[in-house]
Amino acid sequence: MGEYRIIKATKDSVFAEKGATANKTHQEWASAINTDTWKQLISSINVKDLDKIKSSPSQQSVDGIDETFQIRTPKKSHIYVNSFADPEHYTQLQQLKEQLDKILPKEYK
C-alpha cells in the first residue's frame, strides 16, 4: 500500500511519476510532445460533457486504489474520482487513458 502514480499532460509535455511511500521509492519521467500528439491525446474529451461525468466513493479502504482525473479548461477545473463506475460518461476518460498509454514508457502504465 501507499503506492502512487501521477501523470500530468500539458500542450507541450507529459510528466509521470510513481513510487511507494512505504519504502520511499520515487521515479520520474518527462517528455516533450508536439501539437499533433496533444490533439490526439485530447481528441476524446468533449468539454461540454465534462460536467456530466460522475465520481464514486473512494475505494482505498477496499483495494487501496483510487483513480483520479483532473482536467483543467480555461473556465473550470474538473476532478473525478473512480469515474469508471459511470460507464455512460467514462468513455472519454478511458480513451484519454489509452492515448496516454501510447506515450508513456511501460513502467509508468
Image (cartoon, rainbow, N blue to C red):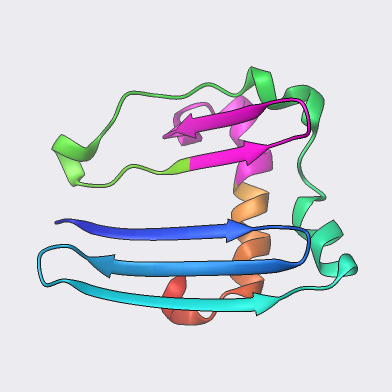
44 part of magenta stretch: no
Residue 88, quarter of the rendered image: top right
Quadrant where the N terminus is found in the figure: bottom left
Question: Residue 67, position in %: x, y?
Answer: 40, 44
Q: Nearer the viewer, residue 16 or 82?
A: 16
- Compared with 31, 46 (above or below) is above
Give x and y (percent) for residue 106.
Answer: 48, 80
Q: Position of residue 43 (x, y in %)?
A: 82, 50
Left/right of residue 67 with respect to residue 40 in the rendered view: left
As drawn, is 68 to the left or to the right of 94?
A: left
**What count of labels does the image hold?**
0
Give whichever of 80, 56 is nearer the camera.
80
Q: Extreme right residue here?
A: 36
Which stretch did the figure color magenta? 69-93
In the image, taking residue 24 as reference, residue 38 lies left or right, namely right
Residue at 17%, 56% in the rendered image:
2
**Residue at the spot 52% in from the left edge and 26% down from the top edge:** 86
Tell me which residue sits at (63%, 60%) in the image: 98
Q: Quadrant of residue 9?
A: bottom right
> Dividing the picture into quarters, in which one does residue 93 lie?
top right
Say left or right for 109 vs 92. left
**Could you tell me residue 97's position as x and y percent?**
59, 55
Q: Residue at x 52, y 41 (%)?
A: 69
Residue furthest front as drawn: 74
Which of the pair 103/23 is nearer the observer? 23
Residue 79 lies, with reference to residue 28, above or below; the image says: above
